[in-house]
Amino acid sequence: MKSIWNKILKVDLTARTCKTEQMPDEVYQKFLGGAGMNAYILWRECPRGTTTFDPANRLTFAPGPMQGLKQSGAAKWTAGAISPSINMNADSAATASFGIEIKEAGYDAIVVHGRSDKPVYVIVDDEKTEIKDAADLWGKNAYEAEDGIQEAEGEKFECVTIGQAGELGVRYANIQSRKKSFVGRCGLGAVMGSKMLKGIAIRGSQSVEVHDPKEVDRLNKEINKRLAELDKLNDEWLQIKRVGTALATELFAPQGNLPIKNYQLADFPSGVKNFHASNYAKQLNAKPWPCQYCTIQCHNNCEVKQGPYAYKGKGPEYESFAMVGFNTMVDDIKAVAYACELANLYSMDTISLGVVIAWAMECYEKGVITKKDTYGLDLSWGNAEAMVEIVRKIGTRADGLGYLLGEGTRIASERLGGGSEDWAVQMKGQEIAAHNWRAQYISALNYCTGVASGPNHERGNSQHIWVGHVRLPEWGIDEVENEERWSWNKTADRNAKFHDYCNVINSACHCKFMEFRGYTLTDLCNTINAATGMGWSLEDLRRCGDRITQLQKLLNIRYGWKKEHDFKYPKRFMEPVQEGPAAGKVPVGLEGAIMDYYKERGWDEEGRPTAAKLKEVGLEDFIE
Ligand code: SF4
């Protein structure tokens, strides 16, 4: 098989060793790389009883067979481990060039385990590897850590680092790369911190051999042209290249998809106006800041020159400004962008952060917490100053509320009580993302049944059938009626296909934003074949996605998942909003839809993969 090295790097921080290990073709043929590799490593090396902060937990950084192809969207990679938020296997993807650099250094993955007795960072310079002292970097924010490593080692190293939140165990701490891209969900930054690992820096000079370079080149040119042309056909403020994911405000508001006031309201006019892409571009001086090789170019570099929220750097993605802005009712776009960048510096996932703060604001409104708990801050809805300050308290794990909020809404609401569990919008310990289930019931089903990292809008993004008008015609999802948003018709089938789609794309390691502008399953399949020479059909591609989903489910079970967890959805799921396009819509019948999904997946009544299903996808040897 081509486009892989058959080689991974194993870093043992306890023994302070770095060793290479050969990996047979069969592993890649079954699981590709990325998310699939993460699941495979956990399966092989973290038996039942391994916990999040156990040194034995494996933290894997893995590109896939598409890195090194120079295709638009191929600057992707995935990290995975047992997560501190959901206490099960999880993976999360990022862009920038770290995955490409792993590949160019001659590896298909870096797997870290053990725990150092003092802060360290890891250097990988082609074959040369070293574990170095990071005492001077500990306590620094994530960007300072990257600067510090590059100053010491040279700018050509691609880095991942954590900030204070990762060091201090915030359960939704993230991992950053290039000050612009983040392994956001499920708290993998806290796993890194628990290992006393401040960063990894990598530099490579090797090109992996691909099966058919001419065909890769042809595909790249054809795909780039098509994607760019399709993006241009949209109105200015709906062009990804122009404004990135800020286009979502205009697209999502008329659908009732925004999360507002801890998911209680249907509309927030000043927020819709201020977070509109045109205002985003103007107020934040947004300029495209693309990943390597990308024609879509969603990332923005922003600059606020003056005032209390002056900063220069990463512009907030939709998920970030929706959760930290709409969900807290803060409509000051500069304050929200600044708060999101603060979160990036501390290394915190902005989705969970926005839900946690909104939950605290609701606690404050209902008198469950008072100014005595909030360091004197007036934590009312929409108070930008208080919102920014509470981000600082969480990021530094300040005694009291700051520390509690760093535990995430599940633990915080259990500890605080006072009925606050009722407005903790989380499942399995992870906060719900910025796609509102009232606008399309399939979101609720996805949140309940996700196996790759709990409730996650990007590990089964079936909401985009309606929200982003994405289709998978090659797998039978084509014509869809708008009214089907609020029906359970075909949702089991569609949800399963989108879970599998996310798994193949996160394992091949390709950016899902390409799909919004016409990147197809056929493109993905053709590219994988041109790279690897595997000669897969579209059915083989689905089977691979199915196999990875089934393995992730087996891991869920191994680490403590129970059927009841899928049915413990947030109370708010069944609370309607009174106005707007989704007025009165709640996903009644969700329980039945979950059971239908189990059946569709080849799971038994208890939600466990059957032996026949595992055999069908080639996982008979994985039955415990
Ligand atoms: S669409 Fe955005 S995240 Fe995806 S590769 Fe391009 S710039 Fe990076």
Image (spheres, rainbow, N blue to C red):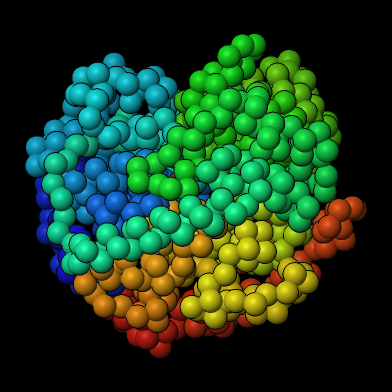
Place of residue 297 in the rendered image (x, y in percent of width and height, measured from the top left): 47, 43
Residue lying at the far left of the rendered structure: 127
Toward the right, the furthest residue is 578
Q: Position of residue 581 (x, y in %)?
A: 84, 57
- The image position of residue 8, as x and y in percent, is 18, 53
Residue placed furthest toward the top: 307
Q: Quadrant of the C terminus?
A: bottom left
Residue at image point 33% right, 71% down: 526
* Residue lying at 66% horizontally and 48% vertically, measured from the top left: 235
Residue in the picture at 30% in, 63% down: 218
In depth, the one of 598 and 242 nearer the eye is: 242
Q: Can you say whether 123 is above or below 352 in the image?
A: above
Q: Quadrant of residue 593?
A: bottom right
Indicate the quadrant containing the N terminus: top left, top right, bottom left or bottom right: bottom left
Q: Position of residue 165 (x, y in %)?
A: 47, 29
Res. 413 visible in picture: no
Residue at point 23%, 45% (across, down) = 102
User: Which residue occupies the foreground of this view, 394 or 336?
Assistant: 336
Q: Which of the 4 image quarters holds residue 398?
A: top right
**Vertical placement of residue 223 versus 271, above or below:** below
Q: Is residue 72 visible?
A: yes
